[in-house]
Image (cartoon, helix red, strand yellow):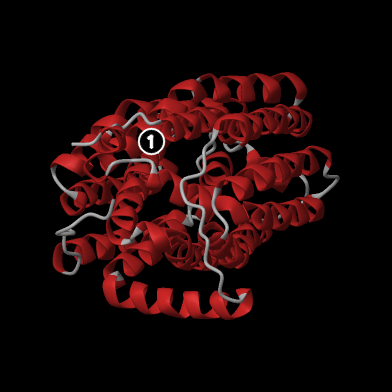
Amino acid sequence: MRGGERRGRRLFTRNFLVIVASWMLWSPVHNLVGGYEPLYIKALGATSTILGLIYAALAAAQAVARFPGGYIADRFGRRRLIVVMGFLYAFTLLLYAVAPDWRLILFAAVLGGIFLIYEPALTAIMADSIPPERRGLGYGFATALPSLVSLPAPLLAGYLVSTYGLVSGMRRAYVIGALLGITASALRFVFLEETYRGGDSAPILKDFARGYMETFRFVLKEASALVTLHVLLAVAYGIYPFVSPYAVEYVRVDAEIWYQVYLAAVAANFLLSVPMGYLIDKLGRRKAGILASLLFTVSAPLYILAASQTANSTPLITIAYSLTSVSINALLNVNSALRADLVPKRGRGRAFTVLLTIWSLSLAASRCLCGILYDAVDPRLPFIQSSVVMVVFVLVLLFWLEEPKRREA
């Protein structure tokens, strides 16, 4: 075996380490602001319906931006797009910090979604950098290590909220988050290496249309089951922005101790990400996906049960949220491994764009629906809906998805 091939088989390649290290800076941002963000937006005047609209707008903006993003990744390369747009996305967090009401949050969410144009490039460069036989473990490490350094973030969020109040504390959290995001982007700028330089000389508009038409045909023919899994998982994932409002408004968990529930979920992800990643490789994508899906279906009844309890409501919501988080992250890694297995390197930017756009549009629709159901019908209904959808997800894994016979490098 040649030296270059040996290097290609290593899990801890330079790019893998750079991306994981940058995620170790980004992940605390998400865990610092993520736990209290829905409550912060509602404190700025949003209803649950508006909250769903804001998160839907973010997902829709991502969907629109991905098409040029995927094309640029395949035509011109991955690195430059990742670096430039990463810096811009970090600066949008400052808009969250100074927002006088939810309207500026909506604008910042749309702007942030557009700047996430680099996501297909980052997804592609990550797939390029992990050997096929270690993708489950690789994505597991890429989830676990950022989760480890993120463990103190919910504690800091809790301190800021309890010390300065919800709104002032979150404003400080967003400023800290912006600084961490800028640092992560600087790390990518200095150390990230290009993995695919494109080189196609065809006219850009003609190549753009032709390339995506070919990609749509490929995805629908070769990955129709995976498309269905993306839709179902996105619909189930739509409950995420409503967990903290549900816990505080309906289950009556004290907002100042919500960070403890969030911290438990982060810790569970850290402890189980690598074992779940190992199972994705050892058992196969399909069996590991079934196991993770079953964990999710168990969580929904616990959300409902927590609302009817007085003494045990916080422990129940903690268990439910931890199960949901672990299962969703494992299923995201299953989907990531399947995408990398099925799509050749040359077309990964565009193919990942199509799949992730389907994911984003499904997520946007789900978030809107969850917000309407929460406000207009019953706050418990979104959790019931997600559990039912996940049962369908299991059926797709059992009776439709076939384990890839050959995994693309």
- Is residue 242 visible to us here? no
Locate residue 54 relative to residue 361 in the image: left or right. right
Name the residue type under label 1. Answer: Ser
Residue named by callout 1: 322
Instruction: State the residue at coordinates (58%, 81%).
Output: 206
Q: Is residue 331 above or below residue 323?
A: below
Residue 336 percent coordinates (x, y): 36, 51
Instruction: State the residue at coordinates (29%, 50%).
Output: 409
Front residue of 123/335: it is: 123
- Is residue 84 visible to us here? yes
Q: Secondary structure at mark 1?
A: helix
Instruction: State the residue at coordinates (86%, 45%).
Output: 100
CA neighbours of label 1 inside 10 A, class few (<14), some (14 to 19), many (20+): many
Residue 387 percent coordinates (x, y): 33, 57
Instruction: State the residue at coordinates (55%, 59%).
Output: 374
Give the quarter of the image for residue 218. Answer: bottom left
Locate residue 394 relative to residue 379 in the image: left or right. left
Front residue of 342/282: it is: 342
